[in-house]
Image (cartoon, grey):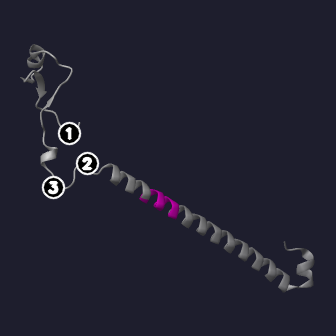
Amino acid sequence: MLTENTLVKGSRSSIERQLRKKKLKSISKILILTILCADGLFLTGFIGYRLYGKWVEANQSIYPPGVEEDRAISPTSIPWIKSKAECLGSNRIWEDGKCFDSEWSHLF
């Protein structure tokens, strides 16, 4: 802090030292704030990258590329339907003593 004694004595060096200290404090505060912001941006980017990688991995197809026949709809038997009447009443196919659903898909 500047005091009257400093001004009366005419010591410019103490005033300059005080101004330099204030300048160094403000520069150090700006430097610390810049480092904290850069660190926050880095962490945000890193976490986003990891989450995006997990999202891509989770949304990949269960089938290898080029295997279209496995993705097709294929009939399967319905084990809880035991009678022909119940099977035909639900718009399914009765064959060999089993009820088949022709709309079943591997993706369900």
Mark 2 and mark 1 lie on one chain; the one further toward the N terminus is: 2
Mark 1: few/some/many CA within 10 Å (<14, 14-19, 20+): few
Helix, strand or loop under label 2: loop
The three-letter amino acid code for the residue at tag 1 is: His
Whether label 3 touches label 1, CB < 8 Å: no
The three-letter amino acid code for the residue at tag 3 is: Gly
Q: Which region is colored magenta?
A: 42-49
- Is residue 44 within the magenta segment? yes
Q: Position of residue 53 (x, y in %)?
A: 38, 56
Horizontal side, residue 79 vs residue 60: left or right? left
Q: Is 41 located above or below residue 31 in the figure?
A: above
Give the distance between the C-alpha atoms of the residues marked 3 and 1, in whole angstroms: 16 Å
User: What residue is rendered at 17% in x and 37% in y?
Assistant: 105
Determine which residue is flagged by label 3: 66
Horizontal side, residue 105 vs residue 44: left or right? left
Q: Is 85 located above or below residue 102 in the figure?
A: above
User: What residue is rendered at 12% in x and 37% in y?
Assistant: 74
Mark 3 and mark 1 lie on one chain; the one further toward the N terminus is: 3
Give the distance between the C-alpha atoms of the residues marked 2 and 1, in whole angstroms: 10 Å
Determine which residue is flagged by label 2: 62
In which quadrant of the rendered image does the C terminus lie?
top left
Give the distance between the C-alpha atoms of the residues marked 2 and 3, in whole angstroms: 12 Å
Whether label 2 touches label 1, CB < 8 Å: yes
Report the residue that reaches farthest toward the front: 96
Q: Position of residue 8 (x, y in %)?
A: 92, 81
Determine which residue is flagged by label 1: 106
Nearest the viewer among 99 and 55 is 99
The three-letter amino acid code for the residue at tag 2 is: Ile
Which disc number belongs to residue 11? none
Whether label 2 touches label 3, CB < 8 Å: no
Helix, strand or loop under label 1: loop
Tell me which corner region of the image, top left, top right, bottom left or bottom right, holds residue 56: bottom left
